[in-house]
Image (cartoon, rainbow, N blue to C red):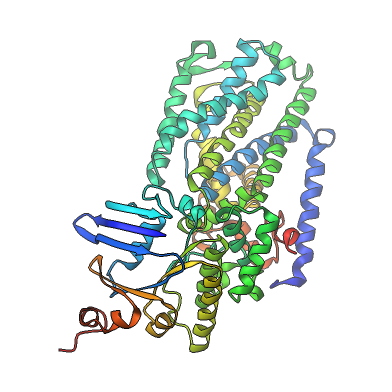
Amino acid sequence: MQHPNRLWIVYLARAALFAAAVVMAVAPMLLATRDIAILTEFLSLLTIAIMWNLLAGYADIVSVGQHAFVGVGAYALFGFAAIAHVDPYLAIPLSALVALVVALPVMVIIFRLRTAYLAVGSWVVAETIMLAAGKLSAFGGGSGISLPVSVVRGFGSRVTERYATIYWIAFAVAALALVATWLLMRSRIGLGLTAMRDNEEGAGVVGVNLIGLRVLCFLWTAPFLGLAGAVITLQKLRVSPPASFSIIDWTVYVIFIVVIGGIGSFEGPIIGTVVFFLIREYLSEIGVWHFIILGVLSIAVVLIEPRGLWGLVRRLLPADVIPISRRRRVRR
Amino acid sequence: MLDLTGLSLHFGALRVLDGLDLKVERGEVLGVLGPNGAGKTTLFNVITGVHRPTAGEIRFEGRVIGRQRSWTRCRAGIGRTFQVPKPFTGMTVFDNVLTAAVHGAGLSFRTAARRAGETLELTGLASRSELEAGALSLLDLKRLELAKAVACGPRLLLLDEIAGGLTDRECGTLLSILTTLREREITIVWIEHVLHALKSAATRLAVLHGGRFIADGAPETVLADPTVQDVYLGAVD
C-alpha cells in the first residue's frame, strides 16, 4: 500500500463508473436520437476493443484480422434475418455462433504463425474472407445490400423507437462482453493470462498452459466480435464487404484505442474508447487533423508509458478501479 | 527419478549439449558445476521443455517427457528457477506465487492461497507479498523465483544460480530453506558457482564441460579430480 491516502480517488472512480453505467442503461430516455446513435457506436467499438485487448494485451496474439469476425457477424445477421427469415432477435445470437464456427478453421491457420507473421497472416485471412463475402450474390456481391424494411421494422416502427431498441441491444452486448471478460480475468484462467502477459516463459514453467489459454482467448473473442458486427449492421441497416469488414474501423481504430487507453489492463480499452470518441466528436470539424492527433497521441503514449493513459494514472493510485486480483478475498 | 541418455542440443553447428548422460536419484542434492558456456542453463532448459533436444531421451519417474510442453512437465512435478529471474512484474508478489500454486499444483483458489502464504513465509517474502513484483530488488526476485518453483509442489527442483550475490547470512538462510525442502522429500539439482554453498548442501557433484559431464561423484572426490581442477578451478601451469 504505497498511497493509502489516495484510496478515495479509486472509490470515486468506481462511483463514477457505476453512475456512467446507470446513465447508459437509461440513455434513450434522456438523450436525443443523434446522441443515442453515437453511444451505440461507442458500445460496439468498446466491445471490439475489450476483445482485442484480451488477445493482444494478454494472450500475445497480435492479430490485425479481427475485423473478419465483425464482418462475419454482420453477414450472418443479414443471412439469418433477411434471407432465412429467422426472427431478427434470434439472428443476433446466431451471428455470434457463426463467428465462433468461422474462428475454428481461422485459428488452425493463424496459430501456426507467431508474432509479426501472425499479424500478417491474420490480415491475409481477413482479406480473403472479405473477398469471399463479396462473391455472395444473395448478399449484394461487392457493393453490398440494405436490410429489408420488414426486418428493420422488427426493431421498432418509428425511428426513435428503433434507435432506442438497437441502442439497448448494443448496451446488452457491451455489458455482456465486459462482465463476462471481467469474470474470466478473475478466474484461474485470468491469473494465468496475466502471468502470460508479464512473462511467457516464466508462466510456462509454473504450469500455465500457454497454448490452451491462447486457444481459449481466440475462441472467446470471436462470438463477441460477431455480436458487435450484428449490432453495427442493425445500426447501418446494410452490409457490404468494405464497410462490414472495414480494417480501418474495426481493427486500426481499435488498436489506437487499446494502445492509447492502456494495453494489458482491464481499464485501458474503456478509457481508450472514451478518449477516441471525445477526439472524434469534438475535433472532427478540423478534418484530417483529428487522425493526426490520434496518431501522435498513440506514439507519445508508446514512448512515455507503454501501459497507456491508464498506466499513467495507475502509477498514482493504490488499486485498480476494476479489481481483477482476488487476493483480498482469498487470503486467510 | 530423472534419467537423461545421449542428450544433445545443437544450434546449427554449435553443440551446446553433446550426448550427455545423467541419472538423478530420489532424495539427492546434485550440485552442477561448470565454466561459463558449458551448457548448464541449457541443460535445465531442455529438462523443463524450453528447448526440444536434438537427440537423446529424457525420462522423469520412468516416463519419457522429451516432447512434452513446459507446463505439462511442471504439472508432472519438475519445478525450476531461472538464473535471470522471470517475475510477473505487473502482479503482486502474492499473485505471482498464487499463479504457480493454482496452475502448477492445480490447487483451488482457497488451497492455493494457503500454499502461497506458506511459501512466502518459507522464502522470507511474507512482508513483500502486497508489493508489485516489478518493484523488488534482485535478491527478492531470486527469492520469488524459488517461491514460485516451490509453490508448484515439485518433486524435482532445478535451481539455477540462486546463491550468487548473497551475503554469508543470506546464504545461510538459503541453505536452511533447502534443508526444509529436502525434508519435504524434494530432489534438488543445483547449478551454482558459489562453491562453499554448494559443498555444504550437495550430496553429489557433477561437472559439465563442453556439453557433457566430465566428472560425477562425491563432492570431495570430484573437487580433487585433476581434470576438474584444470577446466573449472583454473589450471596452474
Q: Nearer the viewer, residue A214 or A4?
A: A214
Q: Position of B165 compared to B116: left or right? A: left
Q: Position of A297 compared to B215: left or right? A: right
Does residue B137 show up?
no
Question: What residue do we see at 58% from left, 20% from top?
Answer: A76
Question: What residue do we see at 81% from left, 48% from top?
Answer: A19
Q: Is residue A224 above or below residue B225?
A: above
Q: Is residue B1 above or below residue A128?
A: below
Across and down, in percent, residue A187 comes to 66, 49
Q: Is residue B167 above or below residue A243?
A: below
Q: Quadrant of residue A156?
A: top right
Across and down, in percent, residue A146 comes to 60, 16
Q: Position of B147 compared to A180: left or right? A: left
Does residue A86 show up?
yes
In the rendered image, the quadrant that contains the N terminus of chain B is bottom left
Q: Quadrant of residue A180?
A: top right
Question: What residue do we see at 50% from left, 61% from top?
Answer: B155
Across and down, in percent, residue B235 comes to 19, 85
Q: Is residue A297 above or below residue A154?
A: below
Q: Quadrant of residue B105?
A: bottom right
In the rendered image, the quadrant that contains the C terminus of chain B is bottom left
Q: Nearer the viewer, residue A327 or B29?
A: B29
Across and down, in percent, residue B141 comes to 52, 72
Q: Nearer the viewer, residue B1 or B38?
A: B1
